[in-house]
Amino acid sequence: MAQIFQPQSVLLLKIGAGAVVLGVVALVLIWRESIAQRPPVDAPVEQVPPFSHKHHVGDVGLDCRFCHASVETSAFAGIPPTSTCMTCHSQLFTDQAMLSPLAASLRENRPLRWKRVHRLPDFVYFNHGIHVAKGVGCSTCHGPVERMPLMWRVQSLEMKWCLACHRAPENFVRPRERVFDMGWRPPQDQAAQGKKLLGAYRIDAKRLADCSNCHR
């Protein structure tokens, strides 16, 4: 019986199959890296300039919305432009070396490059505005930022962590006027108060764990 494949063809098939396997492995590794949470939990993220939430929020008392202007209306909380920073720093600490990148940003009309602290995978949809509107406080996800000289992640942001809230939202929601209050602590009857708030916010708790809420 005549040989169907020549030795050269067999070699090319083996090389092709190996290339496919390596390609699949590479794609998996790239995908894993793309969804990996960076930086690690509890690891302060160095910034240039070294912005301190402790100073601006804890000491000065700035409201979150002063810098994160779109947090109530948009999926993205917003990063302040240099002009917002210069509202104060055109008059205060103008000769500080650590603020020289801020001055350069204004002078060159070039935005500051902040390092991302909280990042979700691209296949996850998250909207800041709807969470704020439904009584989820900033500190629930971001932790006690008023005590952070440098910002770090305090939560895993993994799916199981999100579902813990979506499956029992009464344990986490607070009065809407306290959403930006870093000193807010849940009352002893949080579950009972939370259920009342769910009704006031018209939250259908039965549908919060639907896949389509976060994966669209």
Image (spheres, rainbow, N blue to C red):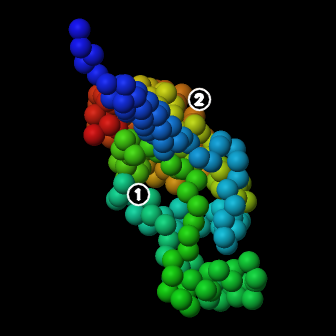
**Does residue 195 appear in the picture of this structure?**
no
Binning the other alpha carbons within 10 Å of mark 1 as few (below 14), some (14 to 19) or many (20 upward) gives some
Say which residue appears at 37% left-offset and 41% top-offset: 123
Which is in the foreground here, disc 2 or disc 1?
1
The image position of residue 137, as x and y in percent, is 50, 47
Query: Disc 2 and disc 1: Cα gap in Å?
Result: 32 Å
Residue 205 circle label: none
Q: Which residue is mark 1?
A: 76
The image position of residue 29, as x and y in percent, is 50, 37
Q: Is residue 45 above or below residue 195?
A: below
Amino acid type at image mark 1: Phe
**Does residue 12 appear in the picture of this structure?**
yes
166, 190: nearer the viewer? 166
Q: Is residue 82 left or right of residue 207?
A: right
Q: Is residue 109 above or below residue 205?
A: below
Amino acid type at image mark 2: Gln
**Residue 71 occupies quadrant:** bottom left
Say which residue appears at 45% left-offset and 64% top-offset: 78
Q: Is residue 12 above or below residue 178?
A: above
Q: Give whichever of discs 2 and 1 has the lower sequence position.
A: 1
Q: Which residue is mark 2?
A: 188
Q: Is residue 168 left or right of residue 125?
A: right
Binning the other alpha carbons within 10 Å of mark 2 as few (below 14), some (14 to 19) or many (20 upward) gives few
Say which residue appears at 33% left-offset and 29% top-offset: 9
Q: Secondary structure at mark 2?
A: loop
Say which residue appears at 40% left-offset and 57% top-offset: 76
The image position of residue 140, as x and y in percent, is 55, 42
